[in-house]
Image (tube, helix red, strand yellow):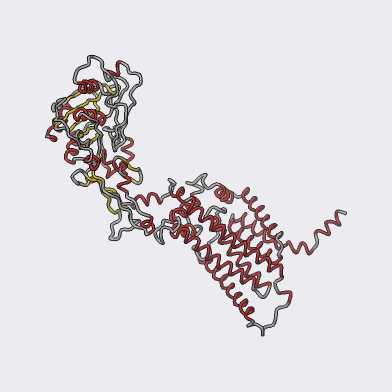
Amino acid sequence: AIGKALSRLVRLEHVRAVAPSIFMWLIAIALLTTQQDLGAAALLLITFVSMLYLASGRPALPLLGLAGLLIGGTASYMMSARVAQRIDIWLNPWLDPQNRSFQIVQSLIAVASGSVFGAGIGSGQPGYVPAVHTDFPFAAIGEEMGLAGMIGLIAAFGVLVLRGWRIARRAKTSYGMLLAGGLSASFTAQVCVIIGGNLGLLPLTGVTLPFISYGGSSLLVSFISVGLLLRLSADGEMSTKGEDRLRPRAPEAFLPSPAQHAASRRAMRLSAALFAVISLAAGYWAVLRSAELVARSDNPRLIDAERAIRRGPILAHDGTTLAYSVPAQQGDQLTHLTPYTRRYPHPEVGPVVGYSSWRHGAGGLERHADAILRGSLSSLERLLHRPQFGAAFTTTLDLALQSQLHRALTGYVGGAIVLEARTGEVLALSSAPSFDPNRLDEEWDALRADARAPLLNRVTQALYQPGRLLQWLYEAESGRPRGQAWDASDRFRLGQPVPFELENAYTPYPSTVTYSETIGQGQLRITPLRVAVAVAELLAGRLVTPTLSKRISESSAVNLPAAGAKIDLRQPLVFFAQNGPRQFVGWLIMAIDGRVVVIGLEQSDTSATRLRAIAAQMRAALE
């Protein structure tokens, strides 16, 4: 009984019916196993399954074919490391964006960078996507022409394919219908597979984008396919107009059946739906996920965009240029892609002005005034790809005083500041050892490795023990001595950060004040900036807010009592404190005509010789 049942199932006509499908499935599997070419195998099998459906009109046959493709793909995933990698990248491209998933992640970033209207033809950087001319041309189009260009390209392919299906439906013979339908299905599969791979909808394959990807053989085959469709279209037009009535009519067996017409109609709708899906995917990455992808740290276009901004100059109070931008590539025509480099004609202002580097970020005033120095573009200017120019930032710095202070600290380790008590203007600020911002990129590693920390601004970031300086501050504020210990309240806000353009360090005032705290030998640490503000408040008789911005200082000027009304600081005061094991800090305080000079010098002994030598230089400069 079993033998009879099997003989009825396995008939010769059944074997003949499924033999072509099995043969094509074996060819596809052979491509996967021998060449590990997922794209060619998928394209071949999808085209065959489509034609099988057109010929039979039975949906079960293509479903079986696709099931075979899934089975083959699963087997290849288990046996082929290359196929497995492609599928793993497709399932989670964000797992390893710097290595295995680099290509697809950069493709999505390129599409997101194009947004709606793109960077402009020739104005994008599609070269950041590996093999962009073969496997990822759609990403290049998305970056330079935006969502509008991507939708236009998909629409053009859609018109071509839908016209192909129309030719298939109007074909006079079954052969013509199958040929036109097969070509249309092949175009649909090729376009959707490669664009789907570029957009992360499908695993990456080596399929070319018709008429777009680099490759002469692909272009030749695409034109041959279009030529065949044109020839079939001409036959269909003649049939529609009755111009071929003198030709002999094809036998009834050669005419397309109603089932085939219905199958071609469904296949045409499926092609339209697939094109709609990839259009939605393009809009998803170019619009909805655009901001997120463009802001990724692994987007190299951020560096290009930063380098293409002509930052505004930083000026001294008299208009002397302290920092400016010049084109890295000299040329008459400046565009939004012209790279700029930063120049610092007076390296002695490095601790204040800071640096702006596309490799190492920004520091100092370059960081604080970044929004002003960068400028901005309106939506229309961005659409027109206008260059971005920043505005100038004028400081309160006196370049002569700054240079003098820089020379005075040369060879020492410490920080010094000159502050105008009346307006809060910082006239000079120097830290030693210093650095040359013009050579920052070349010397960055050496600067970071230097034990003396030349990148540290010791005026705002170095914390030193006040010692007897704390006692002097409170006695000068009250006008009378307070004995061996005094009130350690935070009258001078020593445990708070200073409102200043540059970030500054501080240690919170201790909640439990010990006797050591009251004599300046506890855990409290202060910066030279905080000391300068406290002394300026003693002179001004009010709260003083230091500033490096000329515009702000001009609006906050107040009358100042004559220097020495409360304290006399024309003769420098020198204090010492033990800042750590075998390390002392020497404090120098001086004020001439309302200008406060505070210096904190790191030294291995308590000698006042160095501080008094610096005081003499500064007195000559101020007077």
- Vertical position of residue 73 compared to residue 591: above or below: below
- Count of numbered labels shown in the rendering: 0
Give the residue at x 23% y 42%. Answer: 550
Quarter of the image that includes the C terminus: top left
Q: Is residue 19 left or right of residue 317?
A: right
Query: Which quadrant would residue 197 be assigned to in this image?
Result: bottom right
Of residues 204 and 426, the one drawn nearer to the viewer in this rendering: 426
Q: Is residue 461 visible?
A: yes
- Vertical position of residue 133 compared to residue 503: above or below: below
Of residues 268 and 546, the one drawn nearer to the viewer in this rendering: 546
- Residue furthest top in the image: 484
Residue 265 is situated, as x and y percent measured from the top left of the image, at 65, 66
- Residue furthest bottom in the image: 246
Give the residue at x 49% y 51%. Answer: 288
Query: Which quadrant would residue 528 be assigned to in this image?
Result: top left
Q: Is residue 264 left or right of residue 577?
A: right
Q: Is residue 475 left or right of residue 298?
A: left
- Residue furthest front in the image: 559
Q: Is residue 348 visible?
A: no
Q: Is residue 437 left or right of residue 608?
A: right
- Vertical position of residue 363 compared to residue 164: above or below: above
Residue 274 is situated, as x and y percent measured from the top left of the image, at 59, 59
Residue 617 is situated, as x and y percent measured from the top left of the image, at 14, 33
Quarter of the image that includes the N terminus: bottom right
Give the residue at x 28% y 48%. Answer: 342
Of residues 452 and 616, the one drawn nearer to the viewer in this rendering: 616
Residue 431 is situated, as x and y percent measured from the top left of the image, at 25, 34
